[in-house]
Image (tube, rainbow, N blue to C red):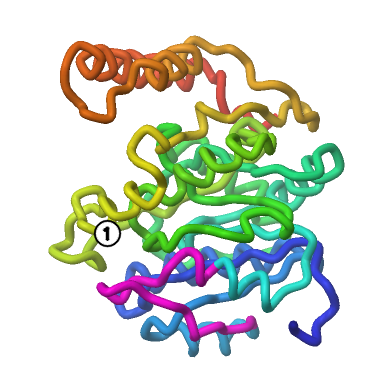
């Protein structure tokens, strides 16, 4: 445990190496945005990627290098979560990808959900935006920045999750997923629902911003979906049928209240998609799954255009 006073929420992450100039800029932006959330929020940086120790020292945050890795040298999610729990005493924890900008509504959302539910998982859709330069973190920066994001950014589909807020008493055991590869984030939602913990979609209450980047840090510069580590992640999670998304959330945070998720057309189609899914990925059920998937994506796009998600009132 650390000697610092207890934080209400501890954010932890496993950054990429800081050697790529653009990755260096956006990860520094992200970490600084977290440090501007207030004294109730702590930050932990996990791993021994190049440049990480220096950045942790520069920003005055704990650096936890002794993370377990798989055969490819990729940090394991199980070890990252265990280190964060061991080196913090916060009642709430949050894993956040190291390229995600957070604003004050993040801690407000965490407080609102924790006041209403004992065990839970908070997830939500992100906004994607091209950012090439260091951001100025002056007082009140988030209010002006949100307006810029709405005009220049684009909301990501509900298939990816870039942050997870949860009480420290849950997710104490996690398979040895590879971080930064597909599958483990989907399993988080699946597992929480199987444990009957409310999974709260905070897309409408909370704006998080993903700073767009390339995939030069991955083998061959290819996206992680085609990597062997992603296939292993899916197996560890119980198969592709357990790859859940924010549309599968049981609850939403609306007007500060945790309520049952609305039955939007996209959510209803997603439910049908899960029911007919065939692990063998062939035959009539697989054909129907693919058609439902296309319909769901079209409905999500239509609902986003109408402003059904992430209005950030």
Residue occupying image coordinates x 41% and y 22%: 274
Image quarter of residue 12: bottom right
Find numbered disc 1 in the image and state the secondary structure of the residue it sits on. helix
Give the answer, above or below, for where 121 lies relative to 27.
above
The verdict on residue 7 being magenta is no
Residue 230 position in % (x across, y down): 28, 53
Residue 86 position in % (x across, y down): 67, 76
Image quarter of residue 49: bottom left
The verdict on residue 72 being magenta is yes
Residue 288 horizontal side relative to residue 195, left or right: left
How many marks the image carries: the answer is 1
User: What's drawn in magenta, residue-wise?
Assistant: 61-80
Residue 247 position in % (x across, y down): 50, 27
Image quarter of residue 291: top left
Q: Mark 1 points at which residue?
A: 229
Residue occupying image coordinates x 49% and y 12%: 268
Give the answer, above or below, for where 287 lies relative to 229.
above
Residue 112 horizontal side relative to residue 194, left or right: right
Quadrant holding the C terminus: top right
Residue 32 position in % (x across, y down): 59, 69
- Residue situated in front as seen by the camera: 215 or 85: 85
- Residue situated in front as seen by the camera: 188 or 51: 188
Quadrant holding the N terminus: bottom right
Count residues near mark 1 (Cα–Cα under 10 Å), then give few for <14, some for 14-19, many for 20+.
many
Residue occupying image coordinates x 43% and y 65%: 26
Question: Magenta residues: mostly which secondary structure?
Answer: loop
Residue found farthest to the left: 220
- Residue situated in front as seen by the camera: 41 or 71: 71
Residue occupying image coordinates x 51% and y 38%: 190
């Amino acid at each position: 445990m650390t000697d610092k006073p207890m934080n209400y929420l501890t954010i932890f992450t496993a950054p990429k190496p800081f050697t790529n100039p653009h990755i260096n800029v956006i990860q520094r932006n992200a970490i600084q945005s977290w440090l501007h959330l207030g004294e109730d929020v702590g930050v932990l940086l996990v791993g021994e990627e190049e440049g990480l120790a220096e950045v942790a020292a520069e920003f005055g945050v704990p650096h936890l290098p002794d993370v377990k890795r798989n055969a490819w040298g990729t940090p394991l999610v199980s070890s990252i979560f265990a280190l964060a729990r061991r080196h913090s005493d916060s009642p709430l924890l949050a894993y956040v990808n190291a390229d995600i900008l957070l604003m004050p509504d993040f801690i407000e959302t965490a407080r609102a959900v924790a006041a209403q539910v004992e065990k839970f998982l908070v997830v939500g859709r992100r906004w994607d935006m091209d950012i090439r330069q260091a951001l100025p973190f002056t007082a009140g920066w988030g209010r002006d920045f949100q307006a810029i994001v709405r005009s220049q950014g684009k909301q990501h589909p509900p298939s990816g999750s870039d942050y997870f807020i949860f009480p420290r008493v849950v997710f104490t055991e996690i398979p040895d997923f590879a971080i930064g590869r597909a599958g483990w984030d989907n399993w988080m939602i699946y597992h929480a629902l199987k444990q009957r913990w409310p999974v709260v979609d905070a897309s409408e209450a909370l704006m998080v911003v993903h700073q767009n980047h390339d995939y030069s840090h991955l083998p061959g510069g290819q996206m992680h979906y085609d990597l062997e580590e992603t296939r292993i992640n899916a197996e560890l999670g119980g198969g592709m049928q357990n790859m859940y998304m924010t549309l599968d959330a049981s609850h939403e945070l609306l007007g500060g209240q945790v309520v049952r998720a609305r039955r939007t057309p996209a959510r209803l189609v997603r439910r049908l998609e899960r029911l007919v899914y065939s692990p063998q990925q062939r035959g009539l059920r697989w054909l129907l799954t693919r058609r439902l998937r296309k319909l769901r994506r079209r409905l999500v796009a239509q609902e986003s255009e109408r402003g059904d998600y992430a209005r950030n009132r």
